[in-house]
């Protein structure tokens, strides 16, 4: 990379200092704290390498104008914001972060679940309004509930481990089952549709690909128990938002 220009988008001040310390003697660096878009792609016109997060636009319409580009480093696990076909055709190397805070996302997932089950948000809002009335704030227990973990990679495995500690029954779906989760936590693998039908809570931890876009849509919601709870701390495109709204309206999904 020596003698090459690296343009970094979506960078925090501390990240900028870190990268300067590591790279400024080897490459020409330029930093922007905003994301790369079609409208500002001139800022990357001379870039040989781009570093960014998931909010930058690295679609075909942008990449086709960046003729000097040799590599893209995304500071994320997901690469669905990058036109990989265009990159492959032009031999642009794409790298990601294979394990990006798996325990962090798992803890956030469980925080969301606990916030829903104990009605934390409603309680806080009511208290801030000066209304000290607990009617309607009764929650529900996680203990004994069946949690379906869709995708049991690093993040899903952490979620399963935390849920096991909360005495939840674990079922899961993954094309590549993790036998360790079965042996240590008792997680039972099964086909996706079967898992969706048995779950009290469904949590999704898979990358977004063209094949699994809207993997939870109208047909899948029809399979679920009435009153199911759904968590998605992966990509929004995994769930058909219109179908989810319908399922919330008719009571199939109690919370999401």
Image (spheres, rainbow, N blue to C red):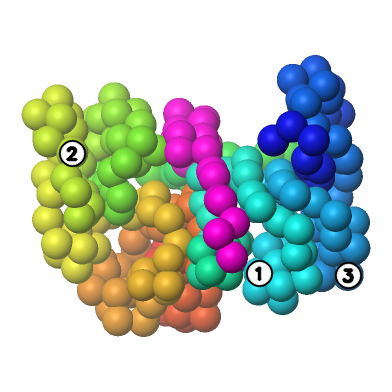
Assign a secondary structure to mark 3.
loop
Q: From mark 2 to mark 1, how far is it between C-alphas?
A: 34 Å
Residue contact at pointers 3 and 1, CB within 8 angstroms: no
**Residue hosting label 3:** 39
Front residue (pair 244, 64): 64
Q: Give the residue displayed 88% in from the left and 44% down from the top.
A: 32
Q: Give the residue displayed 54% in from the left and 45% down from the top.
A: 95
Residue positioned most to the front: 3
Image quadrant in which the N terminus is located: top right
Q: Which picture quadrant has residue 252?
A: bottom left
First reached walking from the N terminus: tag 2 or tag 1:
1
Q: Give the residue displayed 54% in from the left and 55% down from the top.
A: 79
Q: Residue 51 location in percent, x, y?
A: 71, 44
- Residue 66 visible, this orientation: yes
Find out whether residue 95 is within the magenta segment: yes
Residue contact at pointers 2 and 3, CB within 8 angstroms: no
First reached walking from the N terminus: tag 3 or tag 1:
3
Q: Which mark is residue 178?
A: 2
Q: From mark 2 to mark 3, how far is it between C-alphas?
A: 44 Å
Q: Give the residue displayed 78% in from the left and 26% down from the top.
A: 26
Q: Which residues are magenta?
A: 90-111
Q: Is residue 151 above or below residue 213?
A: above
Front residue (pair 231, 65): 65
**Residue hosting label 1:** 59
Between disc 2 and disc 1, the foreground one is: 1
Q: Residue 15 location in percent, x, y?
A: 77, 28
- Residue 121 visible, this orientation: no
Q: Residue 242 location in percent, x, y?
A: 52, 80
Front residue (pair 30, 53): 30
Q: Which picture quadrant has residue 102?
A: top left
């Amino acid at each position: 990379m020596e003698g090459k220009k690296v343009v970094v988008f979506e960078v925090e001040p501390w990240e900028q200092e870190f990268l300067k310390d590591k790279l400024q003697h080897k490459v020409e660096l330029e930093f922007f704290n905003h994301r790369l878009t079609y409208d500002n792609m001139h800022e990357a016109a001379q870039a040989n390498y781009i570093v960014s997060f998931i909010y930058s636009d690295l679609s075909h319409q942008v990449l086709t104008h960046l003729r000097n580009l040799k590599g893209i480093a995304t500071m994320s696990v997901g690469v669905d914001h990058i036109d990989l076909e265009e990159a492959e055709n032009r031999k642009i190397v794409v790298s990601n972060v294979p394990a990006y805070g798996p325990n962090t996302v798992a803890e956030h997932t469980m925080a969301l679940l606990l916030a829903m089950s104990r009605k934390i948000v409603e309680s806080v809002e009511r208290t801030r309004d000066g209304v000290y009335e607990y009617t309607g704030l009764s929650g529900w227990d996680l203990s004994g509930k069946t949690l379906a973990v869709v995708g049991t990679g690093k993040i899903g495995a952490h979620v399963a481990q935390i849920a096991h500690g909360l005495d939840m029954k674990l079922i899961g779906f993954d094309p590549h089952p993790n036998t360790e989760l079965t042996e240590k936590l008792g997680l039972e693998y099964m086909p996706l549709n079967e898992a969706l039908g048995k779950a009290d809570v469904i949590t999704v931890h898979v990358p977004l690909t063209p094949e699994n876009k809207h993997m939870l849509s109208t047909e899948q919601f029809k399979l679920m128990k009435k009153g199911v709870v759904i968590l998605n701390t992966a990509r929004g495109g995994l769930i058909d938002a219109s179908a989810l709204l319908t399922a919330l309206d008719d009571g199939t999904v109690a919370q999401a």
